[in-house]
Amino acid sequence: MRIEKKKFPKRKKQLPTSIKSDQTKSIRICLAQINSKVGDFKGNLKKIRDSLKASKKYQSDIVLFPELALTGYPPEDLLLKKDFIAENLKTLKKLAPNTENIISVIGYCEYNRGKLFNSAAIFSNGKLRSSYRKTCLPNYGVFDEKRYFQEGNLPLRFEFNGIRCGITICEDIWDPNGPGKYLTTRGEVDILLNLSSSPFYSDKRKIREKLIQKRAQQYKTTIAYVNLIGGQDELVFDGASLIVDNKGKTIVRGKSFEEDLIFFDLNINSSKRSHELTSSKKNIKKLKLSLPKRTQKKALPPTKEPAVLDETAEIYKALTLGAQDYFRKNGFEKAVLGLSGGIDSALTAAIAADALGSENVIGILMPSPYSSKGSVSDSLNLAKNLNIKTHTIAIDPAMKALQDMLKPYFNKTSPGVAEENLQARIRGNIVMAFSNKFGWLALTTGNKSETSVGYCTLYGDMAGGFALIKDVSKTWVYKLSKFYNKQKKKDIIPKAIIEKAPSAELRPNQKDTDSLPGYDLLDAMLLHYVEKDCGLKDLIGLGFPKKEAERVIKLVNLSEYKRRQGPPGIKITSKSFGKDRRLPITNGFIEEK
């Protein structure tokens, strides 16, 4: 990750100030891990109000909401619309009456003198007291915050009942020299609060938690971190909010991929502040807040430590939640997809059934003269196991009709890719016809390995509204299918589907390996070339065959135009196609041999 160093104002000479109190103070924090929807101010307002109500019920001192919880994340070019900004500010004001007797820190978009800031609003006793502006704006991967926001330059901390709390927003804590360091090295805070909207990819939770633990040790300060959950277009936010003590130990953790309210009582002994305090009133925004003193707080509800998911379970949860929210947030109820008898369509159907309910998934079987017996029987067995409805439509008549229409023009040529792709496009037309007629959202079933090298057909198997496994390699398709069956304790996805050799079945005895390297080799090369930006020399140096590496690189580069026309899909790797990886279609660069 590339981190830019943030310059803060020069520090004035620190003056030692002694603190003699040995009194240990308790603070009750609520991390409100909610699922916001971009632009749904009414819905987001209700979620925040409901969380505030629950937080006050259990007498929380502070409730912390995710980054841009009010607008949803990421709002992208909605931030360029004046009405969007105005509605965001109008909605923020509506929250004030709900913040009596509790300090509430809520992510929103601040507008000040013609500039936008990614900010955290601090409410106390029914009034908006101040805002902290995000200092470190990410501008890599899926992030482009510098397109919209101005950088803040003034760290903020507030004090209540003798406890000092600093505020940071997401990327601020990823930068080791960010505002958190500035606050903690000056002895300004007892606890650091971080509002985040950190999207998921494989192993991101581990990376994130280790980072927070490292910062807590570096800063010698307890860190409370709240993260967004939910699907937003191609991104999925996994939650897993946490509190880490000043020794770097995680002391509480929220659920993954679920909304959650995480309550925790922290005991803080301010007499043990290990840093000198400064008497300077400059370079830090300081607030003095108050809350009613409570002699005895209401007992918190019993909670169970959430299970820590392994990598495969996390990816499956991300795909399920991403699909569920894409449908729900965009007003779709039912999904339709082609069932080929292959493992890609089987996994897509299984995830869709889990996400939407089996009654909301319809499979279309479209056999051709080249389809194996298993393509139909295996699909029907899968549908029966999933309890989804199917329709079977043979495409022979359409194939013959098109062949007859094109015969005068093709009669002096040999059958090839054009004739094969006609079959895929007939199937795409049929699936889209059902989508148009009944308002069902069409799911494509192509995986990342295929779309990387262009082993897919424009307006054929790429036709649809959502590419559920777009960022899932073929290797992971197999892993997830086996995981799914293990979780269900039954071979819902038939063994015959998992064990058969992959084939597009567009010509007699066709196999994927006729056109591509074996998927183990292909996926290993794609991991390094696509996700790690390795070049040809790098691949050869890693031991990949030169001829195969050259072929794969060429296929990936030539297929950019196809990927640009494909539907959105769920990001589960560190670099997905689209926002993560932006290469020109017209490209004269050739990898050196």
Image (cartoon, rainbow, N blue to C red):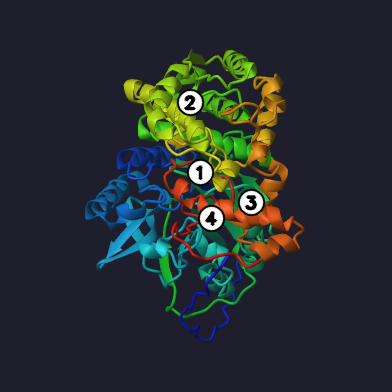
The residue at 25%/67% (across/down) is 114
**Amino acid type of the residue tagged 4 in the rendering:** Asn
Judged by depth in the image, the label closer to the viewer, 4 or 2, is: 4
* Vertical order, 25 against 511 (above or below): below
Q: Helix, strand, or loop for circle 1? A: strand
Tell me whether circle 2 and circle 1 mark residues in contact (CB < 8 Å). Answer: no
Q: Amino acid at mark 2?
A: Leu
Where residue 554 sits in the image (x, y, percent)?
58, 55
Spatial separation of the CA atoms under disc 3 and disc 1: 23 Å
Residue indicated by mark 1: 236
Q: Amino acid at mark 3?
A: Leu
For marks 3 and 1, the one nearer the N-term is: 1
The residues bearing labels 2 and 1 have C-alpha atoms spaced at a distance of: 22 Å
Residue visible at 54% across and 25% down in the picture: 349
Quarter occupied by residue 144: bottom left
Q: Where is mark 4, residue-wise?
A: 557
Task: Decide: few, some or many residues near mark 4? Use Cα within 10 Å; few <14, some 14-19, many ≥20.
Answer: some
* Residue denoted by label 2: 337
**Residue labelled with disc 3:** 526
**Quadrant that contains the N terminus:** bottom right
* Position in image of residue 516 (x %, y %): 65, 43
How would you rate the neighbour count of disc 2 (Cα within 10 Å): few for under 14, some for 14-19, many for 20 or more?
many
Label 4: element kind: helix
Question: Which tag is nearer the camera, tag 4 or tag 1?
Answer: 4
Q: Earlier in the sequence, mark 4 or mark 3?
A: 3
The quarter holding residue 383 reads top right
The C terminus is located in which quarter?
Answer: bottom right
- Sequence-earlier tag: 2 or 1: 1
Identify which residue, 242 or 299, lies in the foreground. 242
Q: Is residue 471 left or right of residue 232?
A: right
Q: Of the residues tagged 2 and 1, which is closer to the observer? A: 2
Rendering coords of residue 519 (x, y %):
69, 42
